[in-house]
Amino acid sequence: MERELGSGGMGTVYLARSRGGHAVAVKVARAELAGDPHFRARFRAEVEAARRVGGFHTAQVVDADPEAAAPWLSTAYISGPTLPELIAERGPMGEAQLRLLGAALTEALQAVHTCGLVHRDLKPGNIVMADDGPRVLDFGIAHALESTRLTSTGMAFGTPGLLAPSRLRGSRSGARPMCSRSERC
């Protein structure tokens, strides 16, 4: 572990190095959540979801242990500011930049949806603006369309103010699965 990258309600993300020296982001669940069987089920689902998603505009899973005393997930580290950090630093994007961003995010969501998943918290803070294009991160509340719901009835997961209207109404939303659960999409 080299340093903390950030923390939130579910845990802390660290910058670390793989045995081969590659930069990785390691998400470690908070200790008080590790004993909750519902949290463990959600974390296992996150790991499974993140392993299935491919495509250029997401971060590849390197390793994970959802059964560890402190469950963790390691992905390739994507260097760059988040979308809000980039805008704060450089100001608003021009039309050409916005079109490229929109196309890249569409490609990322197609990769997610092809696996039968819905991200459920796509927000500017979960988009890292790497030198070679944006990456969609944090599948912590991705929802497998064919899976049993792990949330309470009437409960909407996501960031207030950024949730899709269908999620706020409690409607099911998403894409048709186009590959099996075991395939990498």
Image: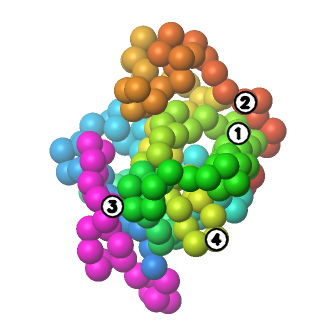
Circle 2 sits in a helix, a strand or a loop, which is it?
Answer: loop
The span picked out in magenta is 1-22
Sequence-first tag of 2 and 3: 3
Residue type, mark 1 in image: His
Category of crowding for the residue at label 4, using alpha-carbon neighbours closer than 10 angstroms: few (below 14), some (14–19), many (at least 20): few
Residue drawn at (60%, 29%), measured in percent from left and top? Answer: 147
Query: Disc 2 vs disc 3: Cβ atoms closer than 8 Å?
Result: no
Q: Position of residue 181 (x, y in %)?
A: 70, 43
Residue 120 sits above or below residue 81 on the image: above
Residue at which label 3 appears = 13
Residue type, mark 4 in image: Asp
- 84 or 140, nearer to the observer: 84
Q: Mark 2 to mark 3: distance in Å?
A: 29 Å
Residue 175: mark in rendering = 2
Sequence-first tag of 1 and 3: 3
Category of crowding for the residue at label 2, using alpha-carbon neighbours closer than 10 angstroms: few (below 14), some (14–19), many (at least 20): some
Residue type, mark 2 in image: Ala
Q: Position of residue 24 (x, y in %)?
A: 45, 73
Circle 4 sits in a helix, a strand or a loop, which is it?
Answer: loop
Sequence-first tag of 1 and 2: 1
Residue drawn at (70%, 39%), measured in percent from left and top? Answer: 113
Residue 170 sits above or below residue 85 on the image: above
Residue type, mark 3 in image: Val
Q: Mark 1 to mark 3: distance in Å?
A: 25 Å
Sequence-first tag of 4 and 3: 3
Q: Position of residue 103 (x, y in %)?
A: 73, 49
Residue at which label 1 appears = 113
Residue 8 sits above or below residue 86 on the image: above
Circle 3 sits in a helix, a strand or a loop, which is it?
Answer: strand
Q: Mark 1 to mark 2: distance in Å?
A: 5 Å
Quadrant location of the N terminus in the rendered image = bottom left
Residue at which label 4 appears = 132
